[in-house]
Image (spheres, helix red, strand yellow):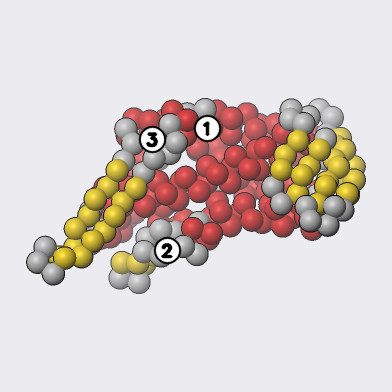
Amino acid sequence: MEGKYNLTLSVKNTEEVISLQGQFREDDWDRLEDFVEYADALLRTTYIQDGMHSAFTMRWDHKLGMTFDTQLPAWDSVIVFLHKFRPLGLKSESTYFYKICNVLTKELTHPYIRNMVQQQRDVFSGKTLQTHYVIKVNDIVVNSENILYDWLNGYEYHRNKEKQVLIESLSSMLPDDIMKSIFLSLLNEKAVAIHKVTSFTKILLGQQSSFEDRIKIIN
């Protein structure tokens, strides 16, 4: 299919206006279309539509020791979310989020676009979340992308015994519901990044007329 684009960027604060024209390779254009289709299906899931609610608190009391409170969504809605997340979150998929980011920045080399995409890569990876808090057990960062995928491959996508042993060793220090809440917070960040990149990609595909972040993009 045709992969031509024509973008006008209006930069906030400086009022700079930049025009970009070009054409994606046909296979890359097709991947962008598939990415948007799968992302829309993810963003329509009940888990996201209900607000991605998940929270946990940890308190220390000199008598009771450490106590935990969690709020988790209905787990069936999380299972559907994880199913829809697969084509966007697994490395083996052609529409894997990082691969789509590479497709975009390979063609769109303007620094404003590249910076915007990099910001969303940092959100997706959990790097941005870790600027707010870091949870460690035995020097292992629990709220990290690596541990999230260990959990997914140990319990949700596969039944990898080695991954299960690792997660269970962490669960000996943190209750299972706390672990789930931590993993959901990472998945929430991924959903936010997917939403942002999808909105921008729809501009390229002619499916949406404008998008506003640090820059306003008008097709």
Q: Find out whether the residues at labels 3 and 1 contact each other: C-beta distance under 8 Å.
A: no
Q: Are marks 2 and 1 in contact (CB under 8 Å)?
A: no
Q: For the residue labelled by badge 3, is the local secondary structure a helix, a strand or a loop? A: helix
* Residue 165 appears in the rendering: no
Find the distance from the CA under tag 3 to the CA under tag 2.
23 Å
C-alpha gap between disc 3 and disc 1 = 11 Å
Q: Nearer the viewer, mark 2 or mark 1?
A: 2
Residue to which mark 3 is pinned: 78
Q: Is residue 187 left or right of residue 88?
A: left
Pointer 2 residue: 133
Tell me the residue at 65%/33% (across/down): 36
Residue 17 percent across, percent down from the top left: 88, 49
User: Height in image: 47 above or below 137?
Assistant: above
Left or right: where 195 falls relative to 216: left
**First in sequence: mark 3 or mark 1?**
1
Which amino acid type corresponds to the residue marked 2 in the rendered image? Tyr
Instruction: Locate the N terminus and report the quarter of the image it occupies.
Output: top right
Q: Amino acid at mark 3?
A: Val
Spatial CA span between label 2 and label 1 = 27 Å
**Numbered disc 2: secondary structure:** loop
- The residue at which mark 1 appears reads as 42
Quadrant (top left, top right, bottom left, bottom right) of the C terminus: top right
Q: Nearer the viewer, mark 3 or mark 2?
A: 2
Please tell me which of labels 2 and 1 falls first in the chain.
1
Q: Provide residue 27's location: percent of width, then percent of height.
A: 76, 36
Q: Is residue 20 above or below residue 42?
A: below
Report the amino acid beneath label 1. Answer: Leu
Q: Secondary structure at mark 1?
A: helix
N-terminal label among 3 and 2? 3
Viewer-closest of 51 and 39? 51
